[in-house]
Amino acid sequence: MRALILGGTRFVGKRLVYLLAEQGHHVTVGSRGRASVSFPDNIQRVTLDRTSIESMKKGLANGEWDIVYDQLCFSADDAATALDVFSGKTGRYVLCSSAAVYTNPIDAVEEQFDPNIFTVSKGDGAGRSYAEGKREAEAVLFQRASFPVVAVRFPIILGPDDYTKRLRVQIQRIANNEPVHIENPDAEISLISSTEAAAFLECLSSIPDTGPFNACSDGPVALKTIVRFIEHATGRTAVVRPQVDADPFSLFGKPRSATIDNGKARKLGFQFQQTRDWLQPLVQDTRK
């Protein structure tokens, strides 16, 4: 199988590259080429700018793929570029989307956001939120693509290779007796590890299903539980202060519960881990 990964030089994408290569697939990684990454010799590299349709067409002009994984599609414009570039050149397209597409994410199921009926706003997309960008990207792809489309809606992804350092920052704050800002410690969130996220994406290479899929570990966790894990790892008691302006990209930036249901993905035969089974060891390892 020929696979193209847009954004495969770090975190989940890098893990996916290795998983697909281990299965014997022919893997191409498309990126700006700025990251110093050592891949096996059988991994092909293509230098391109995902935000430029001209660069995408030039870099991918001579390729055809059985599956394309796009981790760099954040807007309607990005999706429109994918429609143009990959028409007639891929058997399947997988958008790495987000649980942020849900406006009421309490055990959210895929039907709560239907990209097939979502209206894309006019304009160049400037000022759109991350969530709105992902909604519009899904809508453009599902409504207009000439190739089969899958959208994987991930919650916050954590792992030892997380370049955002969301977990590490909070561990360091508690370890240094600095305040952590949480508006609602009782709020529950869904999470997934980078290992599990990559494994689910790899699983999609061998099944024909299309449409949106939630992908998260089993069992949401309360923010106060994560604090407790960190306290145990650091030997410190957290100084918790209210957070007035919620930061959606912060690990603790949820003013209310944000959970998704992974039942549809589990019906594919994929076995998700319990969140606590990997989260507490990750906290311990990150503290070292």
Image: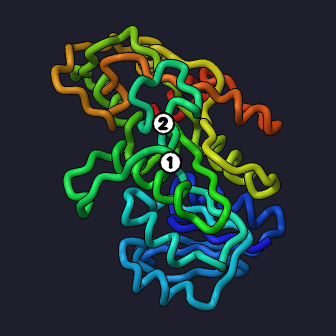
* Discs 2, 1 touching: Cβ within 8 Å: no
Q: Residue furthest left?
A: 244
Residue type indicated by callout 2: Ala
Identify whether 209 is placed above or below 227. Answer: below
Neighbours of disc 1 within 10 Å: few (<14), some (14-19), many (20+): many
Residue 115: mark: none
**Quadrant housing residue 55:** bottom left
Spot occupied by residue 256 in the image (x, y as percentages of width and height):
35, 17
- The secondary structure type at the circle numbered 2 is helix
Q: CA distance from mark 2 to mark 1?
A: 7 Å
Front-lying residue, 164 or 73: 73
Spot occupied by residue 223 in the image (x, y as percentages of width and height):
41, 17
Q: Quadrant of the N terminus?
A: bottom right
Residue to which mark 2 is pinned: 99
Front-lying residue, 140 or 79: 140
Residue pictured at 42% horizontal, 76% vertical? 32
Identify whether 113 is placed above or below 180. Answer: below
Q: Tag count in the figure?
A: 2
Residue pictured at 44% horizontal, 68% vertical? 80
Residue 232 in view, yes or no = no
Residue type indicated by callout 1: Ser
Residue to which mark 1 is pinned: 97
Spot occupied by residue 164 in the image (x, y as percentages of width and height):
38, 46
Residue 160 in view, yes or no = yes
Residue pictured at 79% horizontal, 54% vertical? 208
Q: How is the image coloured?
A: rainbow
Neighbours of disc 2 within 10 Å: few (<14), some (14-19), many (20+): many
Spot occupied by residue 33 in the image (x, y as percentages of width and height):
45, 78
Identify whether 58 is placed above or below 166. Answer: below
